[in-house]
Image (cartoon, grey):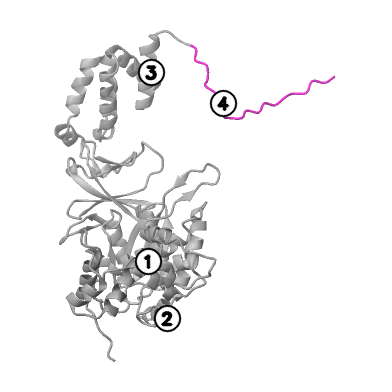
Amino acid sequence: MARERVSQRMQKEIQSLHERGYSRRAIARILKVSRKTVRKFIFHETAPIAAAIDVEPTKTIDWKVVVESYAKGVTLSQLHREYAEESSYLSFWRAFRRLKPVQPEVTLKLDHQPAERSQIDFTDGISVVDRETGLIRKTQLFVGVLPFSSYTFGEFVLDQKLPTFLGVQDRMFAFFGGVTPYVVVDNLRSGVSRAHRYDPEVNPTYCEYGRHMGFAVLPARPYTPKDKAACECMIGVIQKQFYQEVRNQKFYSLAELNGCFRLYLERLNRAVMKDYGISRSERFESEKKLLKPLPAERFERTEWSFAKVHPDCHIQVGRNFYSVPFRWVGHTVRVRRSEKLLEIFSSEGEALAAHALIEGQHRFSTRTEHYPDEKLGVARFEISHAKKQAEAIGPQTASLVEKLFNDSHPLRYLRRVQGLLRLKKSFSAESLEYGCRQALHFQKYSLAYIQNCVKHFEQNGNRLTLVSPKRDLDTLHLHQRKEIPS
């Protein structure tokens, strides 16, 4: 006898009539199906779920806890290992699906070319706990995937800053053993300076890194996760599997967390994929041969920024100052800083100057040829205005300013004079005159010395005061003791 087939629509009608109070006989008569069929689908909805799974007689499953755990992201395979490992996974899955049926979704399988591109992204990681202080630190999980084989790399880091972003990609390409021609990146600031659907602006340093490694950057469209669907899928797999496996564990260091995660990645890449019947590692073997080789030299990281050229022909980078040709005063220039060199470019990319990177703070790197000659400097910049301001304060201030500007390149001390004249906003003219007189007498022209003299006069006047030396209590002082002969 042929088996009676019942459509989904007919099943819903049976359930609807049953909920409205119709008997099985009445439902069978109305829908023109057998009572056996009606009984089957009514039983399907109302029968106890625990009876559908073969477990030990003494062990019962708390399905409420199972459903709640599944809603929080725990996978069914993990729940099967924890609650019904003695039974088969298939019977556990069937029982769970009777309790919580799933609606089928329409999907489209993408065809990826081997070794064509990598997809990378960050997501929230697992927190680590400081063993001594108990302080909890959040982490970020970096995931890189080769879409053709789904071969996956991942690492937990503390931030998404540019040095971390480049360093973790170095380790990813070393893990793959090569480089793909394209890298699809999400719109984080370390990779994309300005996100746009059609014309995104990639971070200049990341562009240089891509040229060095041999790949082109392909920013994903904003709010379009399907542009990096393989990476998004693997992030979901890791969150459902690894995150739930270690949900009851505490990690006390990043190294401990990554060590546990590497063991999981090894299992993940070796696990057989249902769609292909082989593992990611096996599928990756054919893809690895097509990857571009890694560069022989290490990438020297650079940082790009913008700076405005001040009237003294210098830009400020960090807390130090670097000279620029005087014709660019008032313009905004681009600055590229590496480990040992600082380069300055115009907005159109013209090279303007290069300096060795200065160590310390409040120091100047000045090239004489960047200044105009004395006459042009006086005529073009507000040196005469600064002299008039100094004369208005007093003769000592005017003498000091005149001495500083009495140079073949008067702009050399313009910034110092501006700082000196700005002291008038906080101190009296008499105090400023005293500080300038002390600077001229002792030939100490640094702004810090003049400011200290001004503060001293403001507090104590012209009288001398004894100041005891300040001793750092954390510093250990050892004194020699001379033995007295007996």
Say whether residue 397 is magenta: no
- Which residue position is annotated with label 1? 237
Choose between 304 and 452: the one closer to the eye: 304
Residue beneath disc 4: 473
Please name the amino acid that badge 1 sits on.
Answer: Val
Contact, CB < 8 Å: mark 1 with mark 4? Answer: no
Dot 3: element: helix
The front one of 161 and 43 is 43
Q: Which residue is mark 3?
A: 453
- Position of 182 compared to 380: left or right? right
The amino acid type, in three-letter code, at marker 3 is Cys
158 left or right of 403 in image: right
Q: Where are the magenta residues, as a range?
A: 466-486
Whether 347 is drawn above or below 434: the answer is below
Which is in the foreground here, disc 2 or disc 1?
1
Q: Residue furthest bottom?
A: 1
Q: CA distance from mark 4 to mark 3?
A: 27 Å
